[in-house]
Amino acid sequence: MLIRTTASSFDSPVSSEITPQDIYHARRDLMKLVATGAAGVTLASWAGRRAFAQTIQKPGKLAVLPAGKSAVAGAMTLEKITDYKDATSYNNYYEFGTDKADPAKNAHTLVTKPWSVVVEGLVKQPKTYTLEDLIKLSPQEERIYRHRCVEGWSMVIPWVGYSLAELIKKVEPLGSAKYVEFVTLADPKTMPFVGSRVLDWPYVEALRLDEAMNPLALLAFGMYGEVLPNQNGAPVRLVVPWKYGFKSGKSIVKIRFTDKEPRTAWNKAAAQEYGFYSNVNPTVDHPRWSQATERRIGEDGLFAKKRKTLMFNGYEAQVGQLYAGMDLKKLF
Ligand SMILES: Nc1nc2c(c(=O)[nH]1)N[C@H]1C(S)=C(S)[C@@H](COP(=O)(O)O)O[C@H]1N2
Ligand SMILES: [Mo]
């Protein structure tokens, strides 16, 4: 994979990486700055506008995880990055409680060292990776993704990791492998809500193999230039930006290749509400609420005007072909 790290290459991204939505939102952010008088000369050029949109403040809370800017098409949205504070205090991580504030309060008990990830099932090279080996398997990239929860909120998060495809290629799936299952940690000693009846533990998620091979599917080890905070799924999680957030399992301990569609935690809990695919889709509502709009966390306060939700969360150019010919109302 091509890794570009210099500022000059960042200043001339190929056009396929920039969507009309990205340009629209970047321009709108700039207009706001101009209106408040905050825009200085450095924002006069297009490069300046993008530099503004992409500047990532390292929070200085956890170990730094160096990464080059990603060259994967679509991997660097220009939209305004969500404040670290919001991204780390408004979470879903049911092993630590069902309230959005619970993971930040409770996840300090998660033990992330030592950590290993078992890769098994229909592969030629099954292997147990230590976290250290897994981190070194491919160069770390920074990716700025839109992140959309099925409950109707969204954020923009700079992740650090590499394409899940890099790991998949290393373990060589057999021809019979059609799905990839992700099993996450379920430790009742350190996770106070494992054992509660909301979900059948461990939290399990899965992708079709071709979805898992799409370069946007990210195995993430960090965010905002540092290792993942516990509440965001330390030490390793999945990020699948064109799907609702629950497809992105946190604190992964096992990756299994199968020939049958795996049962997933939310599908088991409420099959009529959470399908296997769960692609972000403004035209298919959740049975109890609309999916047509979203509220961007940290944007304009509590009474924020809602934004229109984009098909495949704005990643249609990159992933639309995976679903050609499928009835997405049935296979939601
Ligand atoms: N193990 C585990 N992974 C999980 C969840 C969970 O409860 N347990 N919640 C999911 C949901 S519903 C969402 S929206 C995202 C939230 O990720 P974030 O808190 O980093 O924004 O994590 C997903 N991964
Ligand atoms: Mo979610």
Image (cartoon, rainbow, N blue to C red):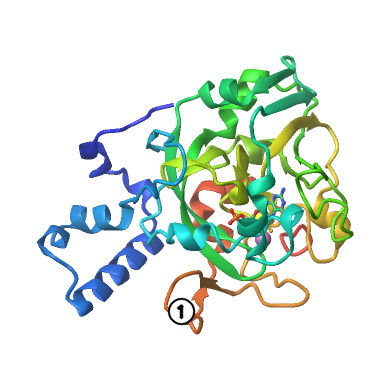
Q: Position of residue 256 (x, y in %)?
A: 77, 31
Q: Is residue 176 left or right of residue 13?
A: right
For ligand 1, tell me if the residue under mark 1 lies within 8 Å. no
Judged from this view, the residue extending furthest toward the top is 125
In this rendering, is residue 197 above or below 207?
below
In this rendering, is residue 133 above or below 50?
above
Judged from this view, the residue extending furthest toward the bottom is 303
Residue on which the image places disc 1? 301
Front in this rendered view, residue 266 or 18: 266
Front in this rendered view, residue 182 or 179: 182
Q: Position of residue 297 (x, y in %)?
A: 50, 69
Q: For the point 83% across and 45% down, which residue is it?
A: 188
Q: For the point 61% across and 34% down, which residue is it?
A: 213
Which quadrant of the view contains residue 49?
bottom left
Q: For the point 73% across and 25% down, which residue is it?
A: 119
Q: Please tell me how crowded label 1 is: few (under 14), some (14-19), or many (20+) other residues with Cα within 10 Å.
A: few
Front in this rendered view, residue 158 or 194: 194
Front in this rendered view, residue 220 or 279: 220
Judged from this view, the residue extending furthest toward the left is 41
Q: Is residue 241 visible?
A: yes
Q: Position of residue 196 (x, y in %)?
A: 87, 57
Name the element at disc 1.
Answer: loop
Q: Amino acid at mark 1?
A: Gly
Q: Position of residue 83 (x, y in %)?
A: 42, 61
Image quadrant occupied by the C terminus = bottom right
